[in-house]
Amino acid sequence: MVDNNQSLTIQLKPGSIRDIERFADMVCDQLFINDTYYGTILMALTETFSLLLEHQDSESFKIEYNTDYQSLNIKIYPVSGKIYEQFAQHAKTIELKDSQGFKEIFLIKSLVDGVNLEGGDVVLLSFDISAMHDEVYEKRKAQLKDYFNVNTEIKIKNTDDQL
């Protein structure tokens, strides 16, 4: 089983985008997340990193994930007050045109299934990965059913065979 509470400290400098990409790769590889979900997760994380790079006060931040295999939760902290407040606001598309940082927030909120704010400096991005596991379950169930149907037909043919 995978350690579901992994944490990584990332420096706020442009080259650290590779650390974000490695984090997304690690999470998606460990949880067997397909390319579509991977792209969504990576884009949400890179947009969040961009936002932090432009507006964050500190020199680093932590990113961690946990999952119950129904949802994937990625916690990013500490997030400066200005960015935290932008996540808390409900942006309208019309307001996005002139607002600095709101385009990124709008994109992030569009990519994730939920954004939760905790303690004044923690942003929790949630992704619903249950559909992916349900799809795998249904596929395996169908394969197993096909396997047993084929073996049943072979057994019946052998029983009815005459010399």
Image (cartoon, rainbow, N blue to C red):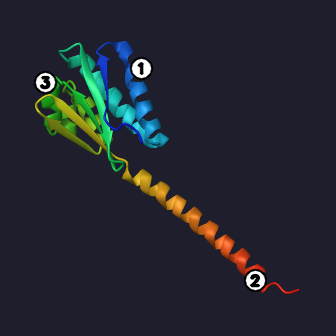
Kind of element beneath mark 3: helix
The crowd level at tag 3 (other Cα within 10 Å; few <14, some 14-19, many 20+) is some
The residue tagged 2 is 159
Where residue 82 sits in the image (x, y, percent)?
A: 13, 24
Where residue 124 sits in the image (x, y, percent)?
A: 23, 36
Answer with left or right where residue 157 lies relative to residue 96: right
Question: Disc 1 vs disc 2: Cβ atoms closer than 8 Å?
Answer: no
Quadrant for the C terminus, please. Answer: bottom right
Which residue is rendered at x = 15% and y = 29% of the image? 84
Marks 1, 2: nearer the viewer: 2
Which residue is rendered at x = 18% and y = 27% of the image? 99
Can you see residue 91? no
- Would you place residue 93 above or below residue 11 in this image? below
Sequence order check: which comes first, mark 3 or mark 2?
3
Residue type at tag 3 = Lys
Outermost residue to the right: 163
Kind of element beneath mark 2: helix
Which residue is rendered at x = 40% and y = 35% of the image? 27
Which residue is rendered at x = 34% and y = 38% of the image? 4
Residue type at tag 1 = Arg
The residue closer to the viewer here, 67 or 89, is: 67
Quadrant for the N terminus, please. Answer: top left
Give the label on residue 82, or none. 3
Question: Disc 3 vs disc 2: Cβ atoms closer than 8 Å?
Answer: no
The residue tagged 1 is 18
The crowd level at tag 2 (other Cα within 10 Å; few <14, some 14-19, many 20+) is few
Sequence order check: which comes first, mark 3 or mark 1?
1
The residue closer to the viewer here, 148 or 125, is: 148
The residue closer to the viewer here, 44 or 102, is: 44
Give how far apart the Cα atoms at labels 1 and 2 are: 62 Å
Where residue 149 sits in the image (x, y, percent)?
A: 63, 73
Marks 3, 2: nearer the viewer: 2
